Image (cartoon, helix red, strand yellow):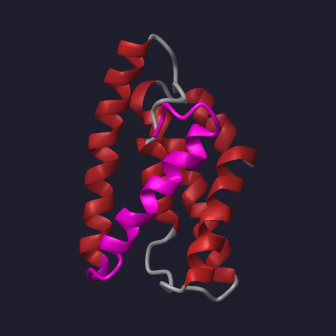
Amino acid sequence: MGRSPVAPGTVGTLGAVPLWFLLHPLPLWSYLAATILLLLAGGIAASKAEEALGSRDHPAIVVDEVVGFLVTMAAVDPSPWAVLLGFALFRSMDILKPPPIRWLERRLQGGAGVMADDVLAGLYARALLGLLGLC
């Protein structure tokens, strides 16, 4: 997914949607545990991928988008409207990087830096979904 020639982050987020459909029926604690495990494994994998690819936060690394989308969609209503809006809000926050997301992305190195900005973008998008009453 990350090798997509067009919008690899968006394609990576699309790949997270089926995973979310598998995880969302779980109790919230199980959903969050799975998300945290993926965050930790993704951070390690992202660090190794950066070294192998010779580039900081290379576009081929999309595990951060997967985790960010899962953060966005924690305890969200499984309606098509909520999924589409969650997807759009997460991608918007990830692309626009409102403060302090961009600062965090620049300050943290390795897998932590790759993952942290998307987790924060996911939290922003999740907060917006909450304000809209979708969770």
Q: Give above or below for 123 relative to 55.
A: below
Give the residue drawn at x 74%, y 49%: 98
**Quadrant in which residue 127 is drawn:** bottom right
Quadrant of image for the N terminus: top left
Q: From this viewpoint, is residue 123 visible?
A: yes
Along the line of sight, the residue nearer the viewer: 113 or 54:
54
Q: Position of residue 27 (x, y in %)?
A: 27, 82
Q: Is residue 116 left or right of residue 88?
A: left
Q: Is residue 4 magenta?
A: yes
Q: Position of residue 97 (x, y in %)?
A: 71, 45
Give the residue drawn at x 43%, y 57%: 16
The majority secondary structure of the magenta stretch comes to: helix
Q: Give above or below for 29 relative to 102.
A: below
- Image mark count: 0
Question: Residue pushed farthest front?
Answer: 5
Give the residue drawn at x 57%, y 38%: 8
Q: Give above or below for 51 relative to 46.
A: above
Q: Position of residue 58 (x, y in %)?
A: 52, 24
Q: Give above or below for 28 relative to 16.
A: below
Q: Position of residue 56 (x, y in %)?
A: 52, 20
Quadrant of image for the C terminus: bottom right
Magenta stretch bounds: 1-28
Q: Is residue 16 magenta?
A: yes
Give the residue drawn at x 55%, y 59%: 122
Q: Is residue 99 left or right of residue 60?
A: right
**Quadrant in which residue 26 is drawn:** bottom left
Question: Residue pushed farthest top?
Answer: 54
Q: From this viewpoint, is residue 99 visible?
A: no
